[in-house]
Image (cartoon, rainbow, N blue to C red):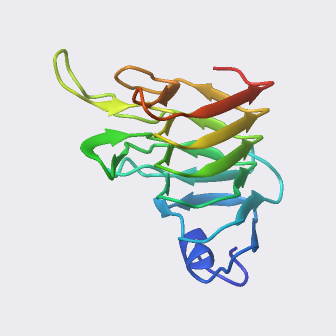
Amino acid sequence: VPYDYSTIQSALDASFDGDSILVNDGIYIENLIWPQLDNITLQSVNGPDSTIIDGSGDTESCIYVGNGQKGVVIDGFKITNGIGSSATFHSSEFGGGIHIDQFVSATINNCIITENGDSTVGPGEIGTYGGGIAIQMHSHAQINNSIISNNFGKDGSGIYLRALSNNTITTKLKNCII
């Protein structure tokens, strides 16, 4: 992206299991919906200072990973201005920057996730659960070498983990600032 595909979403839509998508420098005004495929890697060429996914304040997450995908990798992006997407089980907004829904395994590397979530919510209003990242039931995530800061959210402006008593979430953080 942008040489073979003009947008990140069009590259994701054209991908197959096991593909890697390389994204060159630039600001990409998009709200991405991850395909129902396994082992897809989305990687910037020059890191988060040069490659930005901007959700434009739309009413969705910058990146939404639905249900059941395995081996999701997001590497080297600044992710900003996402509000949050509805989860399969609930109409509230979750994960302004990245929303990992149910039964997903994902790795997030070398990202800056900032200024996501709904900053306009007043007292008593619901707002976004997990302004930076939301990880839902039965999902597993590893977050490495990332900064998650200045996000807005109810019950977790950095990372929100949602599990009920009969399910699990495994999340490992390494060299992160939240």
The foreground one among 137 and 25 is 137
Q: Farthest residue in the top direction? A: 123
Q: Is residue 74 left or right of residue 91?
A: right
**Residue 1 vertical placement versus 124 (above, below):** below
Query: Residue 79: horizontal and vertical position, in percent?
Result: 58, 45
The foreground one among 9 and 94 is 94
Residue ID at (34%, 52%): 58
Q: Is residue 80 left or right of residue 51?
A: left
Query: Residue 153: horizontal and vertical position, in percent?
Result: 38, 26
**Residue 157 vertical placement versus 5 (above, below):** above
Q: Farthest residue in the left direction? A: 124
In the rendered image, the quadrant that contains the C terminus is top right
Q: Is residue 87 left or right of residue 92?
A: right
Query: Residue 2: horizontal and vertical position, in percent?
Result: 68, 75
Q: Quadrant of residue 15?
A: bottom right
In the rendered image, the quadrant that contains the N terminus is bottom right
What is the count of numbered marks?
0
Residue ID at (46%, 52%): 55
Residue ID at (44%, 40%): 96
Query: Residue 94: horizontal and vertical position, in percent?
Result: 38, 39
Q: Is residue 69 left or right of residue 50?
A: left
